[in-house]
Image (tube, rainbow, N blue to C red):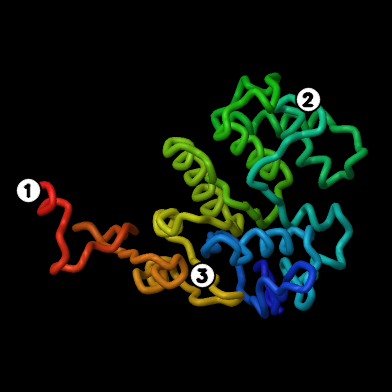
Amino acid sequence: MRESVLSLENLTLGYGGKTVVRDISFEVERGSVVTLLGANGEGKTTIIRAVCQLKIPRRGRVCADGKDLSQLKHGERASLVSYVPQSHKPGLPLSVRDMVVLGRQYCRGLFAEPSREDYDRADRVLERLTLGGRGGELFTSLSGGEQRLVLIARALVQSARYMVLDEPVANLDMGNQIRVLRVIEELAREGTGILMSSHFPQHSLWLRSRAVILHRGGILARGEAEDVITGENLTRIYGTPIAVVRDGEGTAYCGPRPEEPERNTLKEMII
């Protein structure tokens, strides 16, 4: 078993009598980003929840640095893997600072009293994520993008070796999408292993990540994003014609496939 990787080994997951994914296997190395791609209902969030031990596999296991996560105590697991959900509505009116400090309590225990060091660490992380001075505000008063950064900050203070993010840029405007993606890129450069699910293949290309493309309960393709995010693969998983084109500098972009030459173009229709 390899160390310094987060490994998903022959995972089969489902709900009730329905199997969602079958025999899924791949690895996330420290210092890298792996993006889960696929259409709605293909099991991206189910896989994310299984990695975070929020969903029990029907078969298979998840290991981090050679340790089966299902066999670890909560604190040891929290030191290996942190989790950033799509959104979070706290049961109590928590401040931004207290929300971030929860990440330390996941390591110490939910009923442990936060230390001065915990709060200092939370303040440093908030400063890094351009939220310095916002610690006293209510978490629920922030914009969607700011709340997502706070959830990343909460995961950051765990100092886990791997971070798992479920749709980290969902429902964010372009500016906040870029801010979140830049944080993810920086974390990977610093040695954190990142696993994220996404509806946006373009983001995987922008991050130069590895990609795992899900289709019909299995893995259609996996590898470097620029190799597996192709018009053929995207057309197959999303069920609509999609092209991947490159500009003069070699940067790839995803978009609708142009109409066939014999069909009227928009320009011709306007003329």
The alpha-carbon separation of the residues under discs 3 and 2 comes to 38 Å
User: Measured from the top left, where is residue 44 in percent x and y?
Assistant: 61, 62
- Under mark 1, the amino acid is Ile
- Tell which of 71 and 46 is nearer to you: 46
User: Measured from the top left, where is residue 227 in percent x and y?
Assistant: 38, 72
Q: Residue at x 57, y 47 (%)?
A: 168
- Tell which of 232 and 142 is nearer to you: 232
Residue 105 position by quadrant: top right
Please tell me which of labels 1 and 2 falls first in the chain.
Answer: 2
- Under mark 2, the amino acid is Pro
| Label 2 Cα crowd, 10 Å radius (few <14 / some 14-19 / many 20+) | few
Left or right: 249, with 158 as reference point:
left
Please tell me which of labels 1 and 3 falls first in the chain.
Answer: 3
- Under mark 3, the amino acid is Ile
User: Measured from the top left, where is residue 50 in percent x and y?
Assistant: 74, 63
The alpha-carbon separation of the residues under discs 1 and 3 comes to 41 Å
Q: Which residue is mark 1?
A: 271
Q: Which residue is mark 3?
A: 213
Q: Residue at x 77, y 29 (%)?
A: 98
| Label 1 Cα crowd, 10 Å radius (few <14 / some 14-19 / many 20+) | few
Local secondary structure at mark 2: loop
User: Measured from the top left, where is residue 176 in percent x and y?
Assistant: 48, 36
Mark number for residue 93? 2
Q: Residue at x 77, y 73 (%)?
A: 17
| Label 3 Cα crowd, 10 Å radius (few <14 / some 14-19 / many 20+) | many
Left or right: 195, with 172 as reference point:
right
Which is more foreground, mark 1 or mark 3? 1
Q: Residue at x 15, y 60 (%)?
A: 264
